[in-house]
Structures are given as structure tokens and as C-alpha cells.
Image: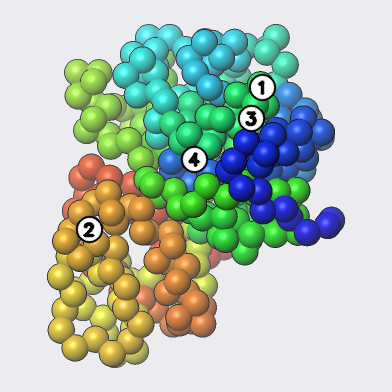
């Protein structure tokens, strides 16, 4: 495949991206969470190429991006608690899993044969302009090789998928930095399938009830234990690095570290930490030449901290 085009996020770049998508090509684009790998969700061949480019197992379904609730209703039955959440938080870093409408014409590969589909309405202005220009539903998993750290810049996308996709629209760094929160229904009970950019506490306050936990009949098939894996090993909830370990801090750093060091947020700001998480993991991986161990400071397990800790646990999990 020829070199991947880097498109500006101006009108010409968006028009080029929409034209490539209409031809069934793959175009990565920025969202407020991470970069997505866009493909026409109605085009089975285009969607098959997404799995191929990412090396993604076919049983792991994709998120479909649409401009708003009206368009979401054309492809799925968004009802009950899901409807309340859509009203409150779309556009934004929230994905809803709802029964798919078979007549909607989505490729079966998008849902991996499930009776439900994951839908997201992104808030990022570049994603919104691309959806408007393309005029259809866009399948969009994170734009990284399967099992690797998600991309929060166009450079990250090109590092992982350069030469394997037609283009990336460069919209700068993603402001949220961790993927969307995914909510499904188990009967009438709203269930957390993946913690993410919209804090669980905010969702529970909106619904006036606590979320059920994934397990039993409903889960996100992509939640494999080892995910987001950098080359370096991570040692979580550390007070300080041991000799030879790198350090990924949060809040004040311990004294006298002489190994590679980065800090997610020196002031202890959770939003700043989420925005820095994936790029800091990549940078430390490079500084450590993909070897050795990085000790990671403890991060409070509330608000965005839940999503950060979820991604850190997956990055630290033993590799298959
Ligand atoms: O923020 C995000 O959500 C980003 C941006 C690009 O939108 N996308 C993203 O997609 O993280 P991906 O493919 O990396 O993660 C989608 C997750 C996977 O864990 C998948 O198993 C789950 O959504 N999923 C998709 N369809 C599902 C369904 N019908 N039921 C349960 N889980 C589903
Ligand atoms: Mg992903």
C-alpha cells in the first residue's frame, strides 16, 4: 500500500478524508478520547480491512460513530436508561450498547454477529465535521495495532498503522486521552462494560442508581486482560522506583530518582493525568528502549482515575 496521507483538519482535508471513506478506504480521525480508525460501517470489505490493519480478532466488535441520537436510532433501539444517558451526555466520551436494527444495513462484521451494537456520538469538532461530510455511520475502533497502546496523536497513529491505512486527519492531541465509557443493559439494568472518559460517578448521579457490573450474560468482548501493552513492564501502586526502574509519577515525585521519569500530573489533576497517560507510556517505552520496568505511582480510584487504573492494570498484565 502507498504511504499513508497526513491530512490537515481544514475543509480540503475533511473533504479528502470523506471521499476516501466513501471509496471504502480506511481513514484515522481524532475524537476527544483517542484517534479512531474510520471505515464505512455499511461496507463489509472496508470493515474487514479494519480488522486486517489492526490485527484485531474478528470476535471483537467495533464501535459505530454517528452525529447524534436521531442517527443512532436508525441503527439501534436506544431506550430506557440508555436514552436518558444519550440525552444527558451525547455528544461526549460515552458509548452505548443497544439492540441493533437489522434493516440498518450495518456490516455483520461490525457487531461480530452479536444482536447489539456499540454506538458513540463524539464531541470532537473534527470528528463531527468528518461525520457530516461523510454522511453515514463510521466504524471506529482505536487506531492502533490490536493489543497496543491507544493513539492520542496523529504521530502515534502513523507509528502503529503507517502504510496500512489510506490517511489520518491530524487534529492534534486528544483532550480526554482515555477511551469512552461503555454502558450496556442487562435486562433493564444499566451495566458498566468499560470505565472511560465519562466518570462512573457522573453517570450514576444522572440515573439516580448504581451501575451493575459486567459479568454473567453481558460483557465487552474486547476487555482482554493484557491490552495496551507497551514493551516495558509496569509495577503499579509504587511509592518510589527501585534501583534501575523508571518512574511514572502522579502528584509530587519522590527525591533522587536517576532513571527515566515522567509525571502524569505533578499537581495531581486527574483530567491532566488521563490526557497524558498513553503518550507518557509511549515516551517511557522509548526512553527505556522497550526494556526493564517502570514503577507507577498510586492513582486514586475515583472519577477518571478508574479509567486510568483500568488501562494501567491491562498494560501491566502478563502477556499472552
Ligand atoms: O473512545 C472510544 O471508544 C474509541 C474512539 C475511537 O471512539 N474507540 C474505541 O474502540 O475504544 P475499540 O474498538 O478500541 O473498543 C471498543 C470496545 C471493545 O472492547 C469491544 O469489545 C466493545 O467496545 N464492544 C463493541 N461492540 C460491543 C457490543 N455489541 N457489546 C459489548 N461490547 C462491545
Ligand atoms: Mg482499542
Decide which of tag 1 and tag 2 comes sooner along the chain. 1
Residue at (67, 39) in percent of width and height: 12
How far is the residue under mark 1 from the one under mark 2? Answer: 39 Å
Which residue corresponds to mark 4? 31
How far is the residue under mark 4 from the one under mark 1? Answer: 17 Å
Decide which of tag 4 and tag 1 comes sooner along the chain. 4
Neighbour class for label 3 at 10 Å: few (<14), some, many (≥20)? many
Q: Quadrant of residue 115?
A: top right
**Front residue of 143 and 244:** 143
Q: Secondary structure at mark 2?
A: loop
**Could you tell me if the residues under marks 4 and 3 are in contact, i.e. CB atoms within 8 Å?**
no
Residue at (73, 24) in percent of width and height: 42
Decide which of tag 4 and tag 2 comes sooner along the chain. 4
Question: Can you say whether 138 is above or below 79 in the image?
Answer: below
Q: Secondary structure at mark 3?
A: strand
Q: Residue furthest front?
A: 11
How far is the residue under mark 2 from the one under mark 3? Answer: 34 Å
Q: Which mark is residue 299?
A: 2
Question: Can you say whether 289 is above or below 15 in the image?
Answer: below
How far is the residue under mark 1 from the one under mark 3? Answer: 6 Å
Neighbour class for label 4 at 10 Å: few (<14), some, many (≥20)? many
Residue 176 rendering spot, x and y as whole percentages: 37, 45
Q: Judge whether residue 239 can be spotted in this image.
A: yes
**Looking at the image, is mark 4 or mark 2 nearer the viewer?**
4
Question: Can you say whether 156 is above or below 220 in the image?
Answer: below
**Looking at the image, is mark 2 or mark 3 nearer the viewer?**
3
Which residue corresponds to mark 3? 138
- For label 4, being within 8 Å of ligand 1 is answered yes
Decide which of tag 4 and tag 3 comes sooner along the chain. 4
**Looking at the image, is mark 1 or mark 2 nearer the viewer?**
1
Q: Which mark is residue 136?
A: 1
Amino acid at each position: 500500500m502507498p504511504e499513508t496521507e497526513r491530512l490537515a483538519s481544514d475543509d480540503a482535508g475533511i473533504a479528502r478524508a470523506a471521499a476516501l471513506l466513501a471509496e471504502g478506504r480506511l481513514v484515522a480521525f481524532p475524537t476527544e478520547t483517542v484517534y479512531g480508525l474510520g471505515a464505512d460501517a455499511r461496507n463489509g470489505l472496508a470493515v474487514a480491512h479494519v480488522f486486517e490493519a489492526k490485527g484485531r480478532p474478528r470476535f471483537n466488535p467495533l464501535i459505530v460513530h454517528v452525529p447524534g441520537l436521531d442517527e443512532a436510532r436508525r441503527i439501534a433501539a436506544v431506550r430506557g436508561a440508555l436514552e436518558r444517558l444519550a440525552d444527558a451526555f451525547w455528544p461526549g466520551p460515552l458509548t452505548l450498547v443497544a439492540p441493533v436494527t437489522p434493516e440498518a444495513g450495518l456490516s455483520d462484521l461490525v457487531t461480530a454477529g452479536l444482536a447489539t451494537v456499540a454506538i458513540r456520538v463524539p464531541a470532537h469538532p473534527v470528528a463531527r465535521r468528518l461525520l457530516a461530510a461523510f454522511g453515514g455511520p463510521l466504524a471506529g475502533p482505536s487506531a492502533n495495532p490490536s493489543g497496543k497502546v491507544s493513539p492520542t496523536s496523529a504521530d502515534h497513529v502513523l507509528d502503529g498503522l503507517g502504510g496500512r491505512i489510506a490517511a489520518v486527519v491530524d487534529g492534534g492531541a486528544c483532550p480526554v486521552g482515555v477511551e469512552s465509557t461503555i454502558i450496556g443493559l442487562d435486562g433493564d439494568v444499566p451495566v458498566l462494560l468499560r470505565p472511560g472518559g465519562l466518570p462512573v460517578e457522573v453517570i450514576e448521579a444522572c440515573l439516580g442508581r448504581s451501575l451493575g457490573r459486567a459479568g454473567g450474560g453481558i460483557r465487552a468482548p474486547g476487555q482482554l486482560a493484557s491490552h495496551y501493552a507497551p514493551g516495558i513492564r509496569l509495577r503499579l501502586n509504587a511509592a518510589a522506583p527501585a534501583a534501575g526502574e523508571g518512574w511514572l509519577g502522579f502528584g509530587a515525585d519522590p527525591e533522587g530518582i536517576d532513571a527515566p521519569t515522567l509525571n502524569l500530573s505533578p499537581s495531581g489533576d486527574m483530567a491532566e493525568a488521563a490526557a497524558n497517560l498513553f503518550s507518557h507510556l509511549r515516551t517511557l517505552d522509548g526512553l527505556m528502549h522497550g526494556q526493564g520496568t517502570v514503577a507507577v505511582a498510586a492513582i486514586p480510584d475515583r472519577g477518571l482515575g478508574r479509567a486510568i487504573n483500568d488501562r494501567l492494570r491491562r498494560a501491566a498484565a502478563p502477556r499472552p
